[in-house]
Image: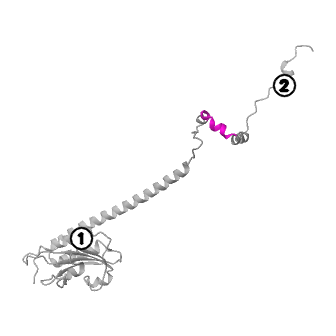
Amino acid sequence: MSGKPDPSASQPAAEAPKEPHWPEIRAWLQANSQTLLDDRSLLEEIGLKPHGRNVVEFGRAALTKLEEAAEREADARKRIESIARANFAAQTQTHVAALDLMEARNPSDLARRLDAVAQGRFGLAGAAIALEKPGGVPFGWRGLEAGGVDGLLGEHGLTWLGPNFDGLNLFGANEAEVKSVALIRMAPQFPGGESAARPAVCAFGSPEEDGFTPTMGCELVAFIARVVERTAERWPLLS
């Protein structure tokens, strides 16, 4: 048979372009890394931020430091919140205790209520009121010899916080349980008596050795002592 030859039969089919292999590209980039670093437009196109040659990236270390700082801040915030809640609870109990004390019907009832709120609301071993002689000492109060308050607190001392000591003996049957004490000076002036105020002490006893320490603030117990002092001035003392 005769006829025109088929051009496609006489020429080999065109081969498809060969795809580059990533291992070869990776090896080339490793060998020619500066070529890629110098091509800033290409780096920006593929989403990489070019840096100067002398710039060292500390992103991971910086992020770790930020995370550690955030954890420390969170821990500090938790401690502050815990302290704030404890202080708020203590202040609330103190205000309720003050209301209980102001409802006392006589000096003996005042001493009983003070001991009860110390144990029931603050978890203490007890509390007591001590009053210097001469003069009458209400039932339930402790009597001190003249100069006894200065002997406990010093001539000009207003408060004393620290371990319990021999010879204090203000807490009656609970004395053995008291490991640390807070002593607050008072000077109640009773109606119908002499014009001068009588030295006195409001004492709080804790069953824990670190319940009261010299470095501790005493604002709350001092507030309770002032309430006791003012409430006691309602009634004249019987000789």
Label 1 or label 2, whichever lies nearer to me, is 1
Labels 1 and 2: the sequence-earlier one = 2
* Mark 2 residue type: Pro
* Mark 1 residue type: Ala
Numbered tag placed on residue 222 in the rendering: 1
Asked if the stretch drawn in magenta spans residue 37, the answer is yes
- Disc 1 to disc 2, C-alpha distance: 108 Å
* SS class, disc 2: loop
**Residue at the (43%, 56%) spot, across then down:** 73
**Where's residue 41, x and y in %?**
60, 33
Where residue 146 sits, quadrant-wise, is bottom left
**Where's residue 98, x and y in %?**
21, 68
**Quarter that holds the C terminus:** bottom left
- Colouring mode (rainbow / by chain / secondary structure / one colour): one colour
Q: Which residues are magenta?
A: 32-42
Q: Is 162 rendered above or below residue 91? A: below
**Quarter that holds the N terminus:** top right
Where residue 185 sits, quadrant-wise, is bottom left
Judged from this view, the residue extending furthest toward the front is 54
In the picture of the structure, the residue carrying the numbered disc 2 is 12
